[in-house]
């Protein structure tokens, strides 16, 4: 009996110890020194990785956010050096994708088109923007190593974290603390967000400005998700997909020969013009469109999409993206194409269907990123923990009500003459399409009086366009140029 009691006690002690070891300190840092060669120039930098609390109104910690902060060494005047604040999306995605494949000093070991290679790991990023800006990668609550306090249970106040407006409010407050702790108030500041991160940074632009009195020089949206369009549906939302269909079909040589014989950037303007001038009004007519017009539109949509005219008519001109991914190559090799990057191919159980069995590109990316981020943070940056790194964390249900982020960005720009916007999208992204991103950009400022402060850049890849080596270089160069161009160098902030 005593032996059993002793064994039970030892098991309980071990369980308690393990439980304690799996709780991160809410406020800690680890610092390491590194070097990287960027555009032929070697530079030394400091990596600071750690956690910083989110405080409630009473000054009590309600979450600990995990971050990684890179600063270039031997900078004479840190106040003149920009700070780039980086988020991914989801909502619920860890800040891993852009960190370990785009702007940071290390990138995945992948091939030149972005496919996994073994052994997994990282290598130097010769195109990182660390030469011109310091960078902090932030993991919102329950993503990466970030956690709410407590981590689970009824005591977690979900209303403070998991919604469009809650997200921007607590992150703005957290960034105030970060900027203060790291003495970066005088620095030019930029925020970049990918996918849902595009919605996040549109909201943060005004939240930082009006709640924290922190003014930005730039907002960068990478493959932005604008839920004012994506989740609303209707003629505009549906029609905006056609130029993406054109791009993906062109890549897979599924367009008519006269279009295939042109360069992609010659073909897309045709599809865009047809979408805006003809397709949106046609779908808006619904069931009252004439048979002749319906037939003519279906024929032209087939011409620009690679789909069959009958399939388009069967969908009443409103073709779901899932159907496109499943059926574009049905008679041309029987592969489905990827959602977030339609260059990727997958194999389904059966040819027939309305949507693919899985996302070919996402499984490929998780194949590369998951082992690399776990290795890199613990072995190279020396952040040791048994906590699981959440590539996608438990943040749902997510409150999408009162989404005013598009107008928030407009108001922030109107109030702040320094504030400029860069939009980056891959032509083969079928989730947050490049033409949807253009449409968002057009809609932010209906007056057009600030349109010279917007810039759009497109790339011949998908959602994570930087996975393709050629676009990794181009996209980083575009951010670098944007930052250098929007540093005011003593110019007054006035109209």
Image (tube, grey):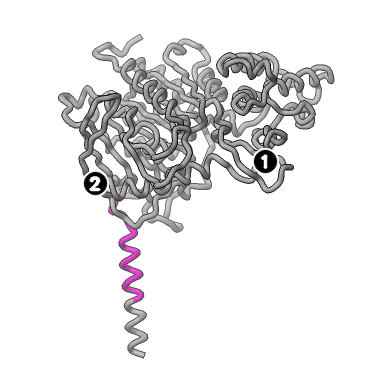
Determine which residue is flagged by label 1: 355
The spot of residue 456 in percent (x, y) is 47, 19
In this rendering, position of residue 218 left or right of residue 447: left
Determine which residue is flagged by label 2: 29
Read off the magenta span. 11-31
State the separation of the CA atoms marked 1 and 2. 45 Å
In this rendering, position of residue 435 left or right of residue 299: left
Can you say which quadrant of the picture contains the C terminus? top left
Residue 378 colored in magenta in the image: no
Outermost bottom residue: 1
For mark 1, give the secondary structure.
Answer: loop
Residue at 34% in and 57% down: 386
When the figure is inspected, residue 357 is found, relative to residue 276, above or below; the finding is below
* Circle nearer the viewer, 1 or 2: 1
Can residue 203 be seen from the camera position used here?
no
Can residue 288 be seen from the camera position used here?
yes
How packed is label 1: few (under 14 Cα within 10 Å), some, or many (20 or more)? some
For mark 2, give the secondary structure.
Answer: strand
In front of the other: 276 or 467: 467
Residue at 50% in and 11% down: 448
Between discs 1 and 2, the one toward the N terminus: 2
The spot of residue 444 in percent (x, y) is 50, 20
The spot of residue 446 in percent (x, y) is 53, 15
Residue at 67% in and 28% down: 234
Quadrant housing residue 347: top right
When the figure is inspected, residue 326 is found, relative to residue 443, above or below; the finding is below
């Amino acid at each position: 009996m005593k032996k059993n009691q002793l064994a039970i006690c030892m098991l309980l002690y071990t369980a308690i110890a393990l439980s304690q070891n799996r709780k991160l300190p809410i406020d800690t840092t680890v610092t390491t020194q590194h070097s990287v060669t960027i555009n032929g120039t070697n530079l030394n930098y400091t990596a600071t990785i750690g956690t910083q609390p989110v405080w409630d109104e009473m000054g009590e910690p309600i979450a600990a956010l995990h971050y990684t902060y890179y600063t270039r060494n031997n900078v004479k005047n840190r106040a003149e050096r920009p700070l780039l604040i980086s988020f991914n999306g989801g909502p619920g995605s860890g800040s891993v994708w852009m960190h370990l494949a785009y702007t940071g000093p290390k990138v995945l070991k992948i091939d030149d088109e972005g496919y996994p290679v073994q052994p997994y790991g990282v290598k130097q990023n010769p195109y990182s923007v660390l030469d011109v800006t310091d960078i902090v990668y932030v993991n919102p609550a329950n993503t990466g190593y970030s956690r709410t306090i407590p981590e689970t249970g009824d005591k977690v106040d979900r209303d403070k974290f998991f919604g469009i407006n809650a997200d921007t409010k607590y992150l703005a407050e957290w960034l105030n603390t970060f900027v203060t702790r790291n003495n970066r108030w005088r620095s030019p500041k930029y925020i970049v967000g990918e996918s849902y991160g595009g919605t996040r940074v549109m909201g943060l632009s005004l939240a930082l400005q009006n709640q924290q009195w922190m003014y930005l020089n730039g907002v960068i949206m990478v493959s932005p998700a604008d839920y004012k369009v994506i989740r609303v549906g209707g003629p505009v939302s549906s029609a905006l997909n056609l130029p993406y269909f054109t791009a993906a079909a062109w890549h897979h040589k599924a367009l008519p020969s006269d279009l295939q014989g042109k360069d992609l950037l010659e073909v897309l303007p045709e599809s865009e013009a047809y979408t805006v001038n003809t397709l949106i009004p046609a779908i808006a007519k619904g069931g009252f469109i004439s048979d002749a017009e319906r037939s003519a539109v279906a024929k032209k949509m087939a011409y620009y999409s690679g789909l069959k005219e009958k399939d388009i008519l069967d969908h009443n001109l409103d073709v779901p993206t899932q159907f496109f991914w499943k059926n574009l190559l049905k008679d041309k090799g029987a592969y489905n194409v990827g959602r977030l990057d339609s260059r990727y191919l997958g194999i389904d159980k059966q040819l027939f269907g309305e949507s693919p069995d899985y996302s070919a590109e996402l499984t490929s990316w998780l194949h590369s990123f998951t082992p690399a981020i776990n290795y890199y943070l613990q072995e190279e940056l020396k952040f040791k923990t048994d906590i699981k790194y959440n590539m996608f964390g438990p943040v749902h249900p997510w409150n999408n009500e009162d989404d005013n982020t598009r107008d928030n960005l407009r108001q922030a720009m109107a109030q702040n003459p320094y504030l400029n916007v860069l939009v980056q999208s891959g032509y083969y992204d079928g989730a947050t399409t490049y033409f949807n991103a253009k449409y968002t950009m057009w809609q932010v400022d209906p007056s057009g009086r600030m349109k010279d402060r917007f810039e759009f850049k497109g790339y011949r890849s998908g959602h994570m366009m930087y996975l393709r080596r050629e676009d990794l270089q181009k996209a980083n160069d575009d951010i670098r140029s944007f930052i250098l161009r929007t540093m005011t160098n003593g110019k007054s902030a006035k109209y």
